[in-house]
Amino acid sequence: MTQQTPYPPAMPPLATPAPPRNGIGTTGFVLGLIGLVFSPIPFVGIIAWPLVVLGLIFAAIGLARVRKGIASNKGLSIAGIVISVLGLGVCVTWIFVFNKAVDDVNKEIAKTAKVSYEVTGDAKNVEIVYGEVLNPSTETAPSLPWHKNVENKGVYKGGTLTVTTAETGGSVTCKITVDGAVVSTKTASGEFATAACTGT
């Protein structure tokens, strides 16, 4: 009678090691993508700054973890770095564009314009309000024509010119000329009629 050799006890299955993860790299990609989407939008794009900076940092850390062999998703980390850099470039470009626009506006405001206010017509004792929008002057002209030359600054260099007839009526025409170019002219007639010109 042969003696049967017992089989060796079965070995428990070896646990498969979990694949390395790269949540940091994924986070960098997501932050960079959101920042890139917001970066070209005026005013809203200001929130893109921290997003693209954080996206760049997280994606770089994720790529470093991949190189050490403790993380995966190398492509996602690289993509996060690329889109974060693009978003940062858009944000920096907006700074230059905004600064240039502010400089252009300041130069335009500081520039002085030669403005001519003129009122013609047959009305008598007309009331004339003219000058800069926030600081107008008032005169009463017994007869027309009436004329005034000034130098104005600001966005609305042409200012305003408003003419109102008296109870005796008549016709009036206002005209504003800025640096030799007529920018506004209006006519009104009758009792207490008003002609209003606005220079831009």
Image (cartoon, rainbow, N blue to C red):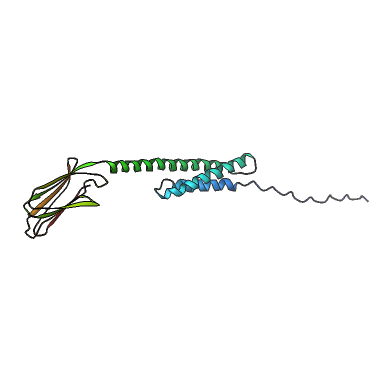
Q: Residue at x 8, y 60 (%)?
A: 167
Which residue is situated farthest in the top direction here?
Answer: 67
Residue 108 or residue 94, whichever sits in front = 108
Q: Is residue 94 above or below residue 188?
A: above
Q: Could you tell me residue 91's position as x and y percent?
A: 44, 43
Q: Is residue 197 left or right of residue 101?
A: left
Residue 96 or residue 159, whichever sits in front = 159
Which of the 4 quarters of the picture holds residue 70?
Answer: top right
Q: Could you tell me residue 3's position as x and y percent?
A: 91, 50
Q: Could you tell me residue 90's position as x and y percent?
A: 43, 42
Q: Residue at x 72, y 49 (%)?
A: 15
Q: Could you tell me residue 152's position as x and y percent?
A: 23, 44
Number of dots carrying numbers: 0
Residue 68 or residue 128, whichever sits in front = 128
Q: Is residue 147 left or right of residue 38?
A: left
Q: Residue at x 11, y 50 (%)?
A: 173
Residue 73 or residue 63, whichever sits in front = 63
Q: Is residue 6 left or right of residue 51?
A: right
